[in-house]
Image (spheres, rainbow, N blue to C red):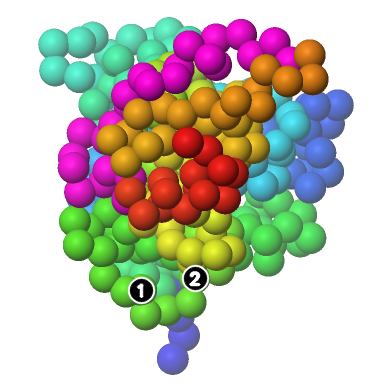
Amino acid sequence: MQMPSFAFPAIRQDTNRATWPTETFGRAPYKPFLLLAVLDLMDAGRITENRIVPDDDLTDAFMLYWNAILPDRLRPSLHLPFFYLRTDGFWTLHPIPGKTLLATEPSSWRNVRERYAFASLNEGFFEHLKNPQKRATARLNLIRRSFAPVLEKLLLDLANTQLSAFDYADILLRETPALYEKAVEKPARDQAFRRVIVKVYDHRCALCGIRIISPDSRTVVDAAHIKDWAVSHDDSPTNGLALCKLCHWTFDSGLVGFDDDFKVIVARSITRDGNLPGHIQQFANRPMIMPERECYYPATDNLAWHRQRYKLG
């Protein structure tokens, strides 16, 4: 039996071979990345109605492709394809109630979120894409039209990573985490763990409290394991902290830790060898910035393991 097929119409893309690599045929890949992200969210059950919301799930899905294919090129300007896909005849923007549907280009992804409640696909297209087999053929057709053959397997693998990561993240966010029956590949684990920890700490560093999200939705925080994954094989929120880059390095180096009351311990060694620790010493005895829900609080056993490893306290 022949697989049912569906393909997106041709889409307009900026062509500039001086800017874009041969792997994208010298064309801007913003729109293909966004459409691939939409297909991923449909596969993961995140989009079940014809409403494509400019939320964190869409951001993460888009960024997985950007970081894998073009990590060092320009800005990952998700606001551009979200806005300009409307010129391709199958994508409609819906303003937030009370807002005007502006014709001017949004200045950032944050600006998109301030303007638009969601985008929708042509209703007939959406009905086609609800069929998993048609989604699969639409994905493959989009990849082959938009990217060189050398990227095909990578892009299909990224879609599988995306689906596994969403599935695994759902498991990790349960109040009583269940054992995950299937083996999870490292890329999916990393993606899911980062997504979960950033979410439960609401983009705020557990040590210094900084919370910055760039206009393009890049967050200042990383996801850090408390007890090394190689030892614990534990990706649950109770074994994670959201930490900014400096605090992440400081924690992983054993220069700071937390006691069982979630207060900061600063290593005595931090002032040796001419070090000037600046504000880090001021964190001593300060309370950790905690997740909102108690079920996601760091496990004291994990905090104790970290203290013992670095002889803190």
Residue neighbourhood size for the residue with mark 2, other residues' Cα within 10 Å, grouped as few (<14), some (14–19), many (≥20): some
Q: Which quarter of the rendered picture does the N terminus lie within?
A: bottom left
> Does the stretch in magenta take in 293?
yes
Which is nearer the eye, 71 or 145? 71
Q: Residue at x 52, y 49 (%)?
A: 308
Magenta-tinted stretch: 275-299
Say if the magenta span includes residue 231: no
Amino acid carrying mark 1 in the image: Tyr
Please provide percent x and percent y for residue 20. Answer: 78, 33
Question: What main secondary structure does the magenta stretch of the protein show?
Answer: loop
Q: Is 15 placed above or below 312 here?
A: above
Q: In the image, what residue type sits under mark 2?
A: Val
Q: Is residue 141 visible?
A: no
Secondary element under disc 1, as helix, strand or loop, is loop
Q: Is residue 37 left or right of residue 117?
A: right
Front one among 123 and 206: 206
Which label belongs to residue 184? 2
Establish if 66 lies above or below 309: above
Residue 164 placement: quadrant: bottom left
- 217 or 278: which is nearer to us? 278
Mark 1 in CB contact with mark 2 (< 8 angstroms): yes
Q: Relative to 49, is 40 on the left or the right?
A: right
Name the residue rendered at 79%, 20% in the picture.
Answer: 273
